[in-house]
Structure formats: C-alpha cells, structure tokens
Amino acid sequence: MRLTRQTNYAIRILMYCATNDGQLSRIPEIASAYGVSELFLFKILQPLVENGIVETLRGRNGGVRLGRAAEDINLFDVVRVTEDNFSMAECFDSETSDCPLVDSCGLNLALHEALNAFFSVLQKHSIADLIAERPNMRAALGIDALAPRKAPPRKKVTAEHHAAIG
C-alpha cells in the first residue's frame, strides 16, 4: 500500500506545527520548508481542519496550529481523513467486485487482515513520537530563523462542540 502525497504532506504539516511549539505556523513558511506550493498545502488543510486536527486563525497575524496536543494525534487519525480509498486489490470491496471468488477466496480475508494490522501500527504512533528527540528538526525546517508569533489561547471546547467535530 502506498500513501498519497496528500497524506505525506498532511503529516509533514502536523510535524512542522508540533515542532513550532504552540506558535502559529504560516502556510508560506511551511511551503518554503518543504519546497511545495502554498495552494497544495491549503488543499491539504481542509480535511485536517474539518476533523479538528488543525486549527486555523484568520487575519494578518493568522496561521495554523495543532487542534489538539501532538501526542493526541496518531498517524491513523491523519491517514483516515486524507486517504480516499484503502482498496488493496480489485476484489477488496465485495459489493463492487465482479470476481466470482470474492466471498470464498482467502486473498480478500488476508488483505483485510493486513490492512487492519497497518491501521493498528499507525494508531500506536503520534505526531509527538515523530518529532521526539530530534533536536535538529527546528533548524532543518527553518523555524529557528523565524520571528516567534504568539498564538491566542485556545477556545474552550464544550462537549457539544467536541461531539459535532469528532
């Protein structure tokens, strides 16, 4: 299985924000750090924002930051919202497959087992894990060269709001 470029950069955005220690991160800075277009990153942000993984703050001094603590965002959270399809073979979806063996073949069962194992491993690793003990990450991303921008405090999330986004 190969993850899309969108998922790869979604994880990179989150790593950048986590490395930036709660400061607001700006899309032009993230795009420059990774050598990709701002438009591409804006497209990637949409599912992350919709699922509460990232928060955006608009305005001249706006930017993006993690929607929750880096240790509370696992890789499966990101993959689940950025990947469109987890079909590993043509016969993976028994409702759309035209294979006469789809309900009696061991391949489909084995692929589902493999996919579940993949998801299980992703659930064990957080964004915080990806940046832990990497002292040169700030310098590698060019964060140390930027002027710090304090982020306004997070809004308190009510139970109703959390239910609506999660």
Image (cartoon, grey):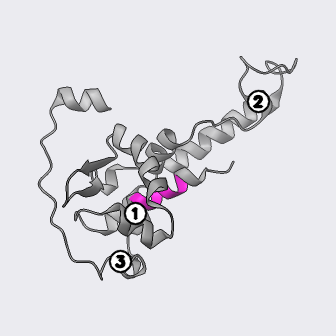
Of marks 1 and 3, which one's residue comes earlier in the chain? 1
Q: Main secondary structure of the magenta part?
A: helix
Q: Relative to 158, is 77 on the left or the right? A: right
Q: CA distance from mark 2 to mark 3?
A: 43 Å
Give how far across and how far down residue 20 sits, in percent. 29, 68
Foreground residue among 123 and 49: 49
Residue 158 vertical position relative to residue 22 in the rendered view, above or below: above
- Between tags 1 and 2, which lies in front? 1
Q: CA distance from mark 1 to mark 3?
A: 10 Å
Foreground residue among 123 and 92: 92
Q: Residue at x 53, y 44 (%)?
A: 120
Residue 64 included in the magenta stretch of the image: no
Q: Please tell me the numbered disc located at residue 15.
A: 1
Q: Mark 1: few, some, or many residues within 10 Å (few <14, many ≥20)? A: many
Q: Which residues are magenta?
A: 7-13
- The secondary element bearing badge 1 is classed as helix
Give how far across and how far down residue 3 sits, in percent. 62, 50
Of marks 2 and 3, which one's residue comes earlier in the chain? 2
Disc 3 marks which amino acid?
Arg
Q: Please tell me the numbered disc located at residue 35.
A: none
Q: Residue at x 81, y 29 (%)?
A: 106
- The secondary element bearing badge 2 is classed as helix
Residue where numbered disc 2 is placed: 108
Q: CA distance from mark 1 to mark 2?
A: 34 Å
Q: Relative to 104, is 50 on the left or the right? A: left
Q: In the figure, residue 161 lies in which quadrant?
A: top left
Q: Please tell me the numbered disc located at residue 138.
A: 3
